Structure formats: structure tokens, C-alpha cells
Amino acid sequence: MTELLAPAGSMEALKAAISNGCDAIYLGMQKFGARAYSSNFDFESLKEAVTYAHLRNVKIYVTMNTIVFENEIEEMKEQMDVLNEIGVDGIIVQDLAAFDYIVKNFLDMEAHCSTQMGIDDLDGTLLFKELGAKRVVLSREVEIEKIKEIRKIAKIPLEIFVHGALCVSYSGNCLMSGLIGYRSGNRGRCVGSCRKEYELIDRTTDTSLGKNYILSTKDLNTIDYINDLKEIDSLKIEGRMKEPAYVANVVSKYRMALDSKITEEDKENLSKTFNRTFTKGYLFHEDKKNITNILRPNNFGYEIGRISKIVKDMYEITLTRTLNQNDTIRISHNNEDVNLTVVKLYDKDGNLINKADDVCYIKIKEKMSKGDLVYITKNYFYYKELESSLDIEFKRFNLDIRVYAYPDSKLIIDGSGLGFNYLYESEEILGEAINNPTTKEQLIKQFSRLNDTIFELNHVDFEESNAFIPAKLLNSARRDIVQGLYDLKLNSHKKRTKTLTAKEKISFAPEKPYLTASVTTKEQYDACVSCGIKEIYFENIIRRNQNDYKEKEGQLLIGGYGGIYHYRKTNPFVTDYSLNVVNSTSCYELFRLGAARVTLSYELNKRQIEDLINAYYGENDGHPALEMIVYGKAPLMFTKYCPMKKMNQCGICKTKSYELKDEQGTFPIISHDDCTTTILNGKTLNLLDELQSIKGIEAFRLNFTVESKEQVEKTIDKALSKLNGRVDKAVFNQETDTRGHFNKEIL
């Protein structure tokens, strides 16, 4: 059976999802979940959530899919221990340290690989199956045919996103929010940099190609493809930041679709709660330029008409759909929005009305124009309908009873439900009926009072025998049986832990620090060779996403888990920054998989690097082999989407250079040969002045992207001088450079 997996940012949203037919819920705690700004759950509310869900055969998965710094590891472990005690079904993780702890310690609580891990191919899926994952959440960029192929070959449950907000960057590979605003998406604190307005600049001619929301994706909606989706194990709805009514709306529609009960009107109703207009996503081959809505980054609503006339102090709206009093509308005027709730609605004679189907009149203090489009963003009556569904039982479970009632004996009732049996026995002895022995009808009447439970009375087996059973006793028996079955169901959940085995220690002989370089062009490569750099990453880079793994010779720089699986037996390799390594356990796991060196995340500061190295030494009685990027324009995003295509520059990108611009600065764009895109930080990471003070790092990497041959040579000369201690003079430029997170902790 395909699992319908729903989001819950609060207990209200959780009940809304279950009331509307989900099979499982994913939710976050106060820490370690990738939605820090959602209400989230504490241990007490989580216990309530698990009890509520498990009684209704709904599973609970907890998101702990942030990167975990060294000083948080113990707290992370403690939280997982409690989650296991509470009876959580699985934990969704990004960090290898989190993954490792679940797999090594728990028998029943599953490890699910978050989409933040960037797994988008068979190789990555097979790696985590081998490591003990029970489910892989694939990247949103993977197409349906490939998903089916992965599932067929890997034979491990797969989960995919089918509805809701989309990241424009591959998830887990967006550093924009963290490097610019110090609030990291990998820490659940994304500020939504992609939802901001940018100007696209043609650098070659220094002209503007316009200002818009060029990185803001539409919302995913795959309801039309439900028959294809039924082959996948779990269908995930995005929305832990969304209100309960949104959750109720989307869950109910996908439930109807999975049960083959959906109508076209039901599908249209998906636009009656929050949406940024819809796309079928890369999942179903959306044209890259149609993945974004560059006009506005927030709730679009749905069109209901336009302003047709201005009459005195009133605006006439000609309607294509019904408008009700108390609906919230949005009027688009000169690319600006006016939002208001329709408190008063008038007909052509100036009379107040409750609703209008063809024409209506409203008063608006802002100045509008004839032709302005009108949208509903909140349909008052539809929301009322949704709110009435937030706390009902989606289905009730059969309660069967067999009743033994004889004079001068105790009342015995064998109750069965939820797959369990509970035997009730009264303390009091039944008397013989003088006039009115208890009938089967009376018994059914008392036992049918189950509305405050998850049960409905099904089969009743009762042989009348002239016994009198007081109604009070039957009510007490009913409550006792219900609670008894509840307890049996809740206590049946296994929470076993494993016996730990000692691990092999891995360490490396310390090396004198040296420089490596990653380059984008042959010209930069030649400059690095001429300057004596021995390890240069150019055609030996295996990036994290969008790979077709060609045969390679020599050492590789691998950015994704699929690459590790594919090349680990044929090539020596170094892991790249894109694996988001921020703790010693992650380093250890990568060394165990064969990494010669591990490149640390851009999101570590100086103290955290020291913590990592000290912890590694303490665990392994020796040094890790680490690499660190100390110079270059950091890649803020890697995306399958092409902003150039959206702005009709397709193909021209090969002859021109472009950048995005906002109030923070400029962001150069690199268009790759396969039409994927990297957006760079406009400021250059420059830690060259710090090289002498950074201890425990073997290789310092210079990352060249848009630099000329001369700039590369000059930078290498500065770096060598700093590394060898030949130059005291600072090379950091306040105007053009940044130290990234080196001296400042991200949130």
C-alpha cells in the first residue's frame, strides 16, 4: 500500500492530517529539525502525538535532519534515546553522525535518509541500503521513470515529495541563507533567499534584463499523476510551516486520489489554500523555465474576476466565480498587490449582499484601475468546511464483543479490536431479573456509545439468560474494554536497542600543510600547474547531483554519496564540502568508506573546527586527514533550474556572463554544459591571513571559479607566502572579501 505522508508543525495540524486520511506523519522537535520556525513538538506533546497516531494505525517520523555540530552530539543522542522510548517509528536524518547513531543503537526505530542528503540516483540509494537505512527520501529533481528504476533495482522503500513548496536548489546544497544571513538551511533556519527579488545583469554588456522573483519556485502539485505515483512506497506532502486547514485540504485530496474517489472540482480546490501557482515538477518533466513563478513569491490564490468599472466611491467587479462576504481577496494593480477582507459587499443598487455570482461592488481606499485582476486568497466558506474536518475520526475500527452474563455469576465480556483481545470481568455478581432481563438490544444500545473513541460496535454475541445487567455496569465495562484495547495496542510497539560492538580506530600521520586547488577552466588549471600546485581538481570532480559516472583515472574529488559508492573500489578519493561535514563522526564514517581526506563544510567556524579535531583525536587516538576551502567565491546554490532560460537567454550564456543583484550585492552565475546552474557568492572567501593559526588541517584549498589566469597566479603566490610565513602584511580586502563563518557561528 502506498503511504500518504503528511506534515505537522503542531498538534492541530497532526489531527487535521489524521482526520483527513493520512497513513503517517512527519514532524519536528524543538532542536535538530529542518523547520526551526515551525511550532514543533516537545517531549510531552510528542507523547500525545504518538499515542493519538498509533491508536489510529498512523506512523510518526521525526525530522532530525539538520547538520549537527560537535558540541551538540550528546544532546542529539539523548533526544534519539527518548524518541525510541516514546515509540517513534523512524527518524529522518541528514548528518552521518545522526544516521550512524540510529543504525548502531536501535532495532525498531528506522533511519530514513532525508532529501537534504541529496540522494538522486541508484548508487547513493544502494550505499545507504548497505549502511542500514530503511528508507531513502529522493531529491525532488529525480524524474518518475528513474525513481521506478531505482526502486526496482535497490529494493528499498523510497519516499518522494508530491505536493507543496519546492527549493530551487538541490536540498542540502544551498548555502545562500547561511553565508549571507548567518541563518542556515542546513540548520533549519532558511530565510528564503530564493523568495527575494533579484535583478538579472548581463555582465558582458552591463545591462539589466529586469527585476523579478527569478529564483522563486511554484508549488509542486502531482495530483493528476496519482496512478504513476501509486507505485512508490511513500508520497510526501510538504508543509510543516502551514496552517491546519492547508494540511486538511491537501491530505484529503491526495487521499481521495489514492482511493480513486477524486473529482475535477476536488483537484481545483487545492488552489483554495496557500499556493504559489502549481508545477508538475521535475518529477513529471516540467520545462525548466516553468518551474518558477517570477511575478510573486507568496500566496497566489485563484482568479475570480477583474475590475470592470469605477462608480463614484465603488469599484465594480465582473466575476467568473462566486465572491462571498468575508472572503479575503488580492487585487493586482501595476505589479503591486492590495489585500483585503470583503467585509461589505454591494449589489448595483447599493444594497448589502452576502454573495455575488456575476457582478458586485466594493469600496477600496487604494486607487485601482479598470482591468485589474482580482483573486481570492482565502475562501471564507471553504475554510469553514475545512475547519469542521480538523478533529473528526477518518475511520473507526471494529469492536466485537462476546458477552457471558448469568445470574449469580460475574459479568464477563471478551472484547476484540485493533488486532487484540481484552477480557473484562466485573467485580460484582449479577442478579436474576425479576421482570425485565437484559436484552441484546439493550446491550447493543449501551455498547454503541463509542463516539468519544476510535471504535464502532460491530459484532455482538450474547445469549440471553434471564440475568439483569445494570446500565451503569455496562457503561463501566465498555470504558474498561476500550482502554484495555488501547493499552494493548500502544504497548505492542517494540522499542528494542542493540548491543554495541567496539569500532576500529582510524587515524592518519600528520602532514605538513599544503595547497590544493579546484578550477573551472583549462586556463585556471594551467595556471595552477605552472605555480607548482600538485593536487588540482578539474576533470576529476564528481559533483554531488546530476551525475552519469564516467570511468575516471586517478584520485577524484567526490561531492555526493552516489559517487562514493560508484568509485570507492576503483579510485582513491577526497570528499567535497557538499557532504556538509561538521563533526568527527561524519569524518570517521567517510574514512571508513575509503576517503583519503574529508573536506569540511563551509558552515563551520574556527572553534567548531578545533572541537571536531579534538573529538576525533579523543575517539581514535590519532589525527583525521582534513581539507578546508580557504579561498574563493563560495557556491551558494546548485540548481537544475536555469534562470537564463527563464529570461530567454538560452544558449547565449555560452558567450556572455551574468549575475544576480540585490541590496546585499551581486551573485555571479555559472551555467554548466548540461544547463544546470551554480550561483556564487559575490564576495570572495579569503582566509589566507589565518593559515598560520589554523591547526590540524592537512590541505588548504583554493577554489577558482570566475578568476583570470593572472588572478589565479597572484592568489597562489599570496597563499604560498602566507602558508610559509613569508608575508606578514594582510591580504584580506574589506570591500571584496569575506571570512564566511570562520569567526561567526551560524544559527
Image (cartoon, rainbow, N blue to C red):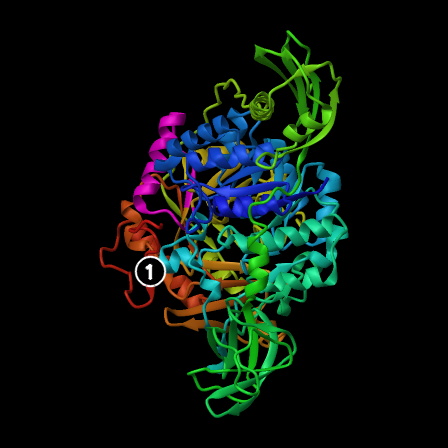
Residue extending farthest to the bottom is: 312
Circle 1 residue: 738
Question: In which quarter of the view is residue 468 placed?
Answer: top right
Across and down, in percent, residue 452 comes to: 57, 36
The answer to whether residue 320 is left or right of residue 600 is: right
Q: Residue at x 37, y 64 (%)?
A: 683
- Tell me the magenta residue range: 601-627
Q: Which kind of residue does numbered mark 1 sit on?
A: Thr
Q: Residue at x 62, y 70 (%)?
A: 289
- In this view, 99 is above or below 669: above
Across and down, in percent, residue 661 comes to: 43, 73
Residue extending farthest to the front is: 435
The answer to whether residue 285 is left or right of residue 325 is: right
Across and down, in percent, residue 277 comes to: 60, 67
Magenta residue check for 230: no
The answer to whether residue 515 is left or right of residue 418 is: left
